[in-house]
Amino acid sequence: MEDISGQVYLSRYHLQRIFKSLTGRGIMEYARSRKLTESLYDLIHTDDRIVSIAEKYGFEYEQSFTRAFKGEFGLSPSEYRRSPRHVPITPKADPSLLIELDHALLVRPFHVFRPAFELGGLLHQVSIQGNLQEFKATSLAVEFFHGHRSRIMQPVNPNVYYGYTFWGEERGQYTYYLSSVEIGKDSALPIDMKRLVVPACSYTVFRFIGFFPPEELTWEHLLEFWNFKDDFLTKNKPIDWENHFHFEYVDRSLCTQDYCELDYYVPVV
């Protein structure tokens, strides 16, 4: 790990987070899964003994290879050799899924379904022009997270920030922005805060990785990100205009003074 992080000029923490964003797995877990995936070919296309295949892929003992293989695929190497079947495999990591921006990276979008959930926080009317010039949403997010979040009793996860944007009748001039956290049935809000139910939706999710704390995230950082998002959605995924809103998701527990992640959720048809 230290050798790899040194070669790419990233800290071990940053490397792990970026790699997991790219593959969905940590580096060591990914490496083991790739070895097990490669071993499938040997089991089917060679007569090599299982102990030899285990050694080829870095397992000191046949038993440890068998245990890892069964954990990965649900059957032992000998069972798979006797009766090959469909199993999920781990493909090679594709670096083209990472797009380099100025002082940041963008992970190519992925798709998820989220059931309905509820947010609680402070609702603001934000001028689109003012947001472009003064980064108003960023300042509202920082003010809420560090100044008002603690006023909500029993949020679902106090470390996760949601910036929820939707349009009113003044579309084109203003948006409404809820700086918030997820709340549940046991949560209690102060009287100046609003509750909002986010409907069950399919989303395209764009992940922005910055090498600075989330409090320093500005419109300038996100301009390339927004351009990529709009271009991708225009070409690939129709936006659900009947349900149109979007929200930012930031898990502050993953962030440091020189690292942040922002997931941007857009509902799609």
Image: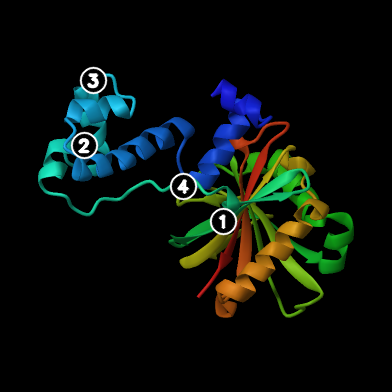
Asked if the residues shown at circle 4 and circle 2 are in contact, with their CB atoms under 8 angstroms apart, the answer is no
Q: Which label number is shown at residue 70?
A: 2
Residue 252: quadrant of the picture: top right
Q: How is the image coloured?
A: rainbow
Q: Residue at x 53, y 71 (%)?
A: 268
Residue 232 x, y percent position in the rendering: 63, 68
Q: Report the front residue among 39 and 266.
A: 39
C-alpha distance separating marks 2 and 3:
14 Å
Q: Amino acid at mark 1?
A: Leu
Q: In what element is the residue under mark 1?
A: strand
Number of disc labels: 4
Left or right of residue 64: residue 246: right
Q: Amino acid at mark 4?
A: Asp
Q: Amino acid at mark 3?
A: Tyr
Q: Residue at x 24, y 35 (%)?
A: 69
Q: Residue at x 16, y 37 (%)?
A: 47
Crowding at mark 2 (Cα within 10 Å: few <14, some 14-19, many 20+):
some
Task: Between label 4 and label 2, give the one nearer the viewer.
Answer: 2
Mark positioned earlier in the residue sequence (2 or 3):
3
